Image (cartoon, rainbow, N blue to C red):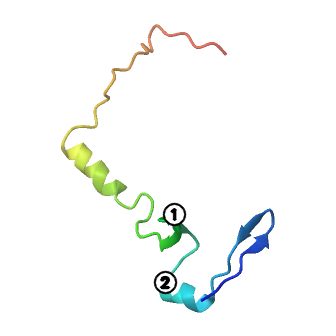
Amino acid sequence: MLASVISIGNSRGIRIPQSILNQLNFNEKVEMEVQDNKLIVSRIEKKPRQDWEKAFSETHESQESDLLIADMIDNDTFEWEW
């Protein structure tokens, strides 16, 4: 299928027909990369923060949630300036 490169504001782009978007199940955002002088457009499989709850639980259970660097502020002697 041939597609024309068109002006879109200050950018340039191509129009993807709805039938192709439906086949690929593209949502509002896609992943783009260039490989071997070809543009690869892929749907995003993983949602941001998808596994955070599991990671937090594992960190808590393994007791690795302690601060790596000790708290340097001694609240009793520190004077805040306003």
Crowd tier of the residue under label 2, counting other residues whose Cα lies within 10 Å: few below 14, some 14–19, many 20 or above:
few
Q: Is residue 7 left or right of residue 73?
A: right
Which residue shows up at 45% across the image and 15% down it?
Answer: 75
Q: Is residue 63 left or right of residue 46?
A: left
Horizontal and vertical percent position of residue 73: 43, 15
Which residue shows up at 39% across the image and 61% down it?
Answer: 50
Which residue shows up at 79% across the image and 71% down it?
Answer: 7
Q: On the image, numbered disc 2 is attached to which residue? A: 24
- The type of residue carrying mark 2 is Leu
Does label 2 or label 1 sit earlier along the sequence?
Answer: 2
Q: Quadrant of residue 4?
A: bottom right
Which residue shows up at 63% across the image and 88% down it?
Answer: 17
Q: Name above or below for residue 81 compared with residue 66.
A: above
Give the residue furthest to the right: 9
For marks 2 and 1, give the CA distance. Answer: 19 Å
Name the quadrant of the N terminus. Answer: bottom right
Horizontal and vertical percent position of residue 47: 44, 65
Q: Secondary structure at mark 1?
A: strand
Residue 34, label in figure: 1
- In the image, 79 versus 10, the foreground residue is 10
- The type of residue carrying mark 1 is Val
Residue 48, label in figure: none
